Amino acid sequence: MENNLLKLRQLMNEHRIDAYIVGTHDPHNTEYLSDYYKSREWITGFTGSQGIAIITQKDAFLWTDGRYFIQAEKQMRDRGFKLMKIGIPGYPDYKEWLVNNLDDYSVLGIWGAVFPYKEWIDIKNSLIDKNIIIKDDKDLIGILWDERPLLPQGKVFVLDVEYSGRSVEDKLLDIRKSMVAKKAEFLLVTTLDDVAWLYNIRGTDLPQSLSIFSYALITDESAYLYIDKSKIDDITISGLSKSGVEIRRYYSIFDDLIKIKNSSIWCDLNSLTLKMFNSIDDSNNYINEILPTTMFKAIKNEVEIAQQKKAYYEDGLAIVRTHHWLKSELVKGNTITEIDVENKLEEYRNMNSCYLGKSFDTISAYGPNAAMMHYRALEDDHSVIERKGFHLMDCGAQFPFGTTDTTRAIVVGDLTQEQKVAYTLALKGNINLSRAKFLKGTTGHSLDILARYYLWQNGIDYKSGTGHGIGFAMNVHEGPHRISPIPNSISMVPGMIVSNEPGVYITGDFGIRLENILVVEDFVSNEHGTFYKFDTLSYLPFEPEAILPELLSSDEIKWLNDYNAKVYDLYEKALSDEEKDWLAKATETI
Amino acid sequence: MENNLLKLRQLMNEHRIDAYIVGTHDPHNTEYLSDYYKSREWITGFTGSQGIAIITQKDAFLWTDGRYFIQAEKQMRDRGFKLMKIGIPGYPDYKEWLVNNLDDYSVLGIWGAVFPYKEWIDIKNSLIDKNIIIKDDKDLIGILWDERPLLPQGKVFVLDVEYSGRSVEDKLLDIRKSMVAKKAEFLLVTTLDDVAWLYNIRGTDLPQSLSIFSYALITDESAYLYIDKSKIDDITISGLSKSGVEIRRYYSIFDDLIKIKNSSIWCDLNSLTLKMFNSIDDSNNYINEILPTTMFKAIKNEVEIAQQKKAYYEDGLAIVRTHHWLKSELVKGNTITEIDVENKLEEYRNMNSCYLGKSFDTISAYGPNAAMMHYRALEDDHSVIERKGFHLMDCGAQFPFGTTDTTRAIVVGDLTQEQKVAYTLALKGNINLSRAKFLKGTTGHSLDILARYYLWQNGIDYKSGTGHGIGFAMNVHEGPHRISPIPNSISMVPGMIVSNEPGVYITGDFGIRLENILVVEDFVSNEHGTFYKFDTLSYLPFEPEAILPELLSSDEIKWLNDYNAKVYDLYEKALSDEEKDWLAKATETI
């Protein structure tokens, strides 16, 4: 296994590179990478979703965060890499390490086609006194990687206006209005979800997010879609053409960009690769603000919201059935593993012909495993579900009419008092946020504390944000808004969809996460201002067995009973009698 | 009255100034100005605490905000000034006005000795294309103002370590440690409260904030206090000298600054005047961060907190007596005005020999007047208190052992259901914030929503922050922390004192503000992190008559009954039987 590292060091010698950096990136700032881009995984053996490796002739390090310390150590055994624990005192961050360990005039190698421009600027600034030379076109892993997977050869499909709610023409009108307001002559779109939203297309290059590798470039008259032509059929091409969209070869974005001079280009420097940045001539000026596609995409139209409700119904039904199946199997005394639950969920989902696949890898985590926020049950490493405590299931689906993401801690046997307190406090936080009304201008940062309030009253916190945006038949994590203790200047406005997922994680013991999905809507306008509220999209039981009513206020009890009644009403007709009886109990009035 | 404006225009001609700006400033970025610095008031007639005037040969404008529109129009009658309403569509802001109305190469006059450096930079940048000439040493009002008040000739007094809790030597040690950490060779302190805190002195130049005009300059070896020597006695000078502090003439700060070259100077550019900024040689570099004096000052030590409790007790007693007096006078059928209440409060306060004066002008506001957040009853313009609705009193006192600030809406007769709902919702917000526990790192910005939550549920908002810091025997408004919807990056840490003042303001109808004062203290540290909570410093009744118990949770009712019981226990012994009977009723269990 260390062989790869040896070969890389040899290659670094040939290319006269003293230190080589391999991160977790693709050309589109995508969250979940296609196999082709898993270079860091290939060289380190570590499969986690976050990490950066630095290799010199003497050293080889991987930096990753607390979610992955155990997994990384295990997976990197015999790979020659040492783990650098992000956030743990005594470990320098990777830029610090470079500053302290690179000699003056060292040569640093990166692959600029995927390396983020912003990251590169930070590195450059950190090393400014060292006169480092950066070679930025070095895909050394690509040279060594014999059986490298191909780039995905997915296909495009179209979301008609009855699904998308707004035509490409109308979207282009909106975008061009924004461009005029910002005095932008060009709009450069490099993130896959923005391109997909703009042109009402989806694809199968990255099936979990229905993405297709592509770029867009917009002027006041033209709109280009850069894509491998083998991925798009003639009917789609001609449909787009009628909407004023011209198809160009995927890689020709670079040639086209180079030709633009003395113009103002709207682009998001936070998501550009170094190569893309370098393709923009210095004579241009940047409008470096959140893209209008990102803002418009986040604000769902009525058609999208109505369909999302359907998506939550369809996926909720499969999940409710899985809960019932799990519980009845356990009652029968059968041995059920975390993997069995995942598989059963897929079985129920696949009964629906519209189901397109998972929107992310299901987290099926029993007992102490659920205390690891990003746990994943593996074929060769998973747990059997016992008849006590909670089983946690965090899962999401893709439909042509929406994207889902929900979590429940499911009661699989006796609960301790501590577990009931924890569940009830997380539920109180969930209700507090769900019921919130808020003044126009309020950010998700301001709302975050509402979900934590009751946990904090008891000295409990969860080390994650409270909520993320969710795409429409698209990315399960979508910006620019979020509900988080990390400051964020984006106001929540009607049409924004956001998750509400407070939790309790007790290491080595149990994990609880109660995730509903909300959409912002109008509440009231008066002399005090304009106020918004949330509507709930997702319906899954909050089980009375896990709840201590004495910790709830009468308002909270009313909210809970109303919610659980809706859960029952929603799925009742589609369930068998046995399932129905179980659901009635799981949604009983308290 | 327009005569002054004529004279100013003549003088502008002589000085070849096309436009002259008069703001609301002194050399120390002080919130409440000494009379000597009320130049804007002298030329416009407008007495409000915020405003900026621009005079040309043709025009004369005053910009101020919504609090003051009516007052400004009234006071500026026959002065030749037109009102520019800040925040109202159709009115340009004053920089916009300058950009749109000044000709190229115009000459702009300001008085740099008081004009804020930051404001000047903004003006300069706005006008960059116009090649404007700025004459920055023009105190034109000073030339015209015949009967200009003298600069205050207050006296310094010392806060011994038994009051301040920390010696000057120890404070200098802390400050120098911070300077080493930031690699600062000089620390320049121009804000009066920072100087006063650092040297454990107070003064009577600005009696409401116990400030004395002064500057400080600190190096690793020296500590200078710049002050008019007539204000400080020999014992104080020798005491300070023993602590390593050297006294220098007030104005010599400028001569001393000019001598500093090639050094790093820690100063707060947000509070420097243009003149002060210009006194710093270009060869120096700035460390422009919150001053260590400001951070240390905000975190009260145990001695300060213990004394603040005493201050709130002493002032609370006078306020409770005033409440009782007001109510009993009304019952007797006597005519009582807002001014009478103010005077009675002072009468009760003056029974305490430690009382040094108000910490700000009392707001005594009946009925609809209380809907104006910054109302002030004037001798020739105030209301009689009727036997219905609320009378609002927002007041504060100075003692050598602390500074107070509290508000209650007092029930003076029958209440409408709307008034009771409003009072109860504001109270719920107050309780929600008071009871909050929060993770280390939480800012006042994050806490703000807790005080608004229940009001927002009912479509009500108040157009102010929720809380401000409060000085110790010092400014009633103190940073750097605040509880506000405006983002703020300062974390709340143990020792910080902050107000909690949600309210309801219905224009033309009534105003409610319920202001308590809190201090941050430790709660618990565990595997989830370190948590803080609040202790309450101020005790005044929340009157059961104004509260709808059916809107309160059982936790809130418990909090309220405990709080009101403490109010009674606290003052009982010091009250007459009649007062005691009334207080028992005003703090009755619900």
Image (cartoon, coloured by chain):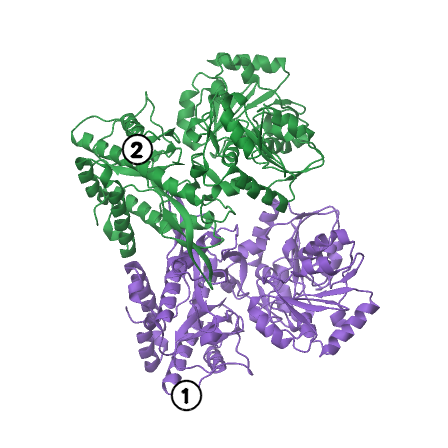
Chain colours: A purple, B green
The answer to whether B3 is drawn above or below residue B427 in the figure is above
Q: In this figure, which residue is indicated by the disc labeled 2?
A: B368
Secondary element under disc 1, as helix, strand or loop, is loop
**Amino acid identity at mark 2:** Pro
Q: How crowded is the residue under tag 2: few (<14 C-alpha within 10 Å), some, or many (20+)?
A: some
Q: In screen coordinates, is B345 left or right of A312? A: left
For residue A396, say whether it is visible: no
Image mark for residue B583:
none
Residue A363 versus residue B80 in the image, above or below: below
Q: Position of residue A482 (x, y in %)?
A: 50, 57
Residue A361 or residue B219, whichever sits in front: B219
Q: Quadrant of residue A3?
A: bottom right
Q: Please state, as top left, top right, bottom left or bottom right, where the N terminus of chain A lies in the image.
A: bottom right
- Residue that label 1 marks: A334
Q: Position of residue B276 (x, y in %)?
A: 61, 29
Locate residue A256: give its quadrant: bottom right
In depth, the one of B61 and A1 nearer the eye is A1
Quadrant where the C terminus of chain A lies?
bottom left
Q: Is label 2 or label 1 in front?
A: 1
Q: Nearer the viewer, residue B265 or A173?
A: B265
